[in-house]
Amino acid sequence: MKYAIVIYVIVSTIWIVLTDFYVEKLPLPQQIVPYVQTFKGFMFVILSAVFMYIAFKKHRELKQMSESEQELLTLIHAMPDFVSFKDGQGRWLRVNEFGLKLYGLEHVDYKGKTDAELAEYTPHFREALLYCIDSDEEAWRAKTVTRAEESFPTPNGEVKTFDVIKVPLFYENGKRKGLVVIGRDITQQKIAEQLLLKKEKLSVIGELAAGIAHEIRNPLTSIKGFLQMMKETKEVDERFVQIMLDEIERVNQIVSQLLVLAKPQMKSYKPFALHDVVDYVIGLFTYEAILQNVQMKYEPRTSATVYGDKSEIIQVFVNVIKNALEAMPKGGTITISTKEKDDRVHVIIEDTGKGIERERLKRIGEPFYTLKEKGMGLGLTTSMKIVHEHKGTMQIESKVGKGTRVEIILPTYKNDPS
């Protein structure tokens, strides 16, 4: 406001001097001069009023903008999420108190500094800040909102996981304008999710155990019979010993199948033959299928190799085939076929079960949505997430009374893990 007053004084002075100068120079009749002076004063009053009105209005708008900005800053600082604003060169313009505390930058003048420069002030978070440079660049290249999970350790040893959203802003000419970064702490959510997934997996194992127990009983019966015979005859036949050893190995393999699903495993991405995975899962469910009078058909039409975590892909097929078996309590057929098209392998699993209603089909894959008495409703949710992480897709079609068709599409391995 004080600048407006200064400008007003300068403009007023110039107006008075110029008008007086030109009035004196003009060859006007003496009787008209008073009217000209009155008109000059009248115009001065009008112009002054207009100028003061504009200045006052501008001052009020600036004040309102300042108040709005202060309210926005108060809101941002009160948020329990990381919020920051960067310019087109990646320099920090504004960050909320949560973000400063998170990275240990409370006493650092961060404005105008890049992630690389700020990394020098907080060595513990150096790698996390340097990683932000790469993820920011990905958002700029995408030219749209990006979302990803980012994890890093804190000084107290806890590993924090954030759901990070990055919004790139551009000028009309396409030049980078700014970047908005919002990160929500989902550490506890991830821990709860892992516990629930573990419970769901144990539920699957419990159901499989009933069918596998019958298969274990068969070799145990053979072993028991040979041992009883050798006890009665007091003789040890090498052939019988070999048979018993083979049966024990068979039991060991069956138990190993359960352990693959039960024990927690680190993710290990490597090439593997998809046929081996499908064949393995079919063997896992063979016993339960026999008990339910379900026929399983496998029609492999490709020997494709995929790149990923073998145990996670096994979990996907286990969840899908388990659902198919549950849809056919009185028997039926499960057909599994594979084909390769456009550098992608398609695995199609079809059953002749009761099918899924249209309304339920729309909600398939939602966490905790299930109509089963057992289970957490995370089976297909987990499967879809795993397939997505392997750069694939999962499509489900179903008709009530006719059955369900699940198609899992994964990229084939071409000696290029990326």
Image (cartoon, grey):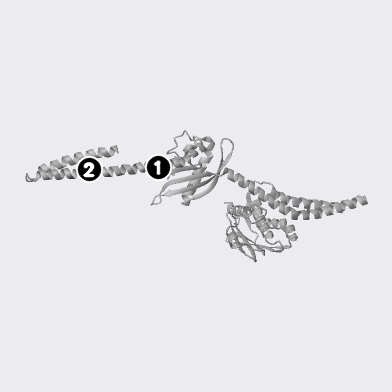
Label 1, residues with CA under 10 Å away: few <14, some 14-19, many ≥20: few
Residue 69 is tagged as: 1
The N terminus is located in which quarter?
top left
Q: Which residue is mark 2?
A: 48
Q: Are marks 1 and 2 in contact (CB under 8 Å)?
A: no
Question: Is 217 left or right of 51, judged from the image as shown?
Answer: right
* Disc sitting over residue 95 in the figure: none
Callout 2, which amino acid? Ser
Q: Nearer the viewer, residue 82 or 235?
A: 82
Q: In this rendering, is residue 54 above or below 297?
A: above
Residue 168 in view of the camera? yes
The residue lying toward the viewer, choosing from 223 and 95, is 95
Total numbered labels: 2
The residue sitting at the right extreme is: 233
Q: Amino acid at mark 1?
A: Glu
Q: Is 9 on the left-hand or right-hand side of 377?
A: left
Q: Along the horizontal axis of the image, is 22 left or right of 380? A: left
Residue 299: tell me if it is visible: no
Q: Position of residue 370 (x, y in %)?
A: 63, 55
- Quadrant in the picture for residue 396: bottom right
* Left or right of residue 249: residue 18: left
The numbered mark, 1 or 2, whose residue comes first in the sequence reads 2
Percent from the top left, x then y, of residue 333? 69, 64
Seen as rendered, the residue at the extreme top is: 107
Q: Secondary structure at mark 2?
A: helix
Per the model, the C-alpha gap separating discs 1 and 2 is: 31 Å
Residue at x 27% of width, y 44% of height: 53
Tell me the crowding category of disc 2: few under 14, some 14 to 19, or many 20 or more residues within 10 angstroms, Cα based: some
Secondary element at image label 1:
helix
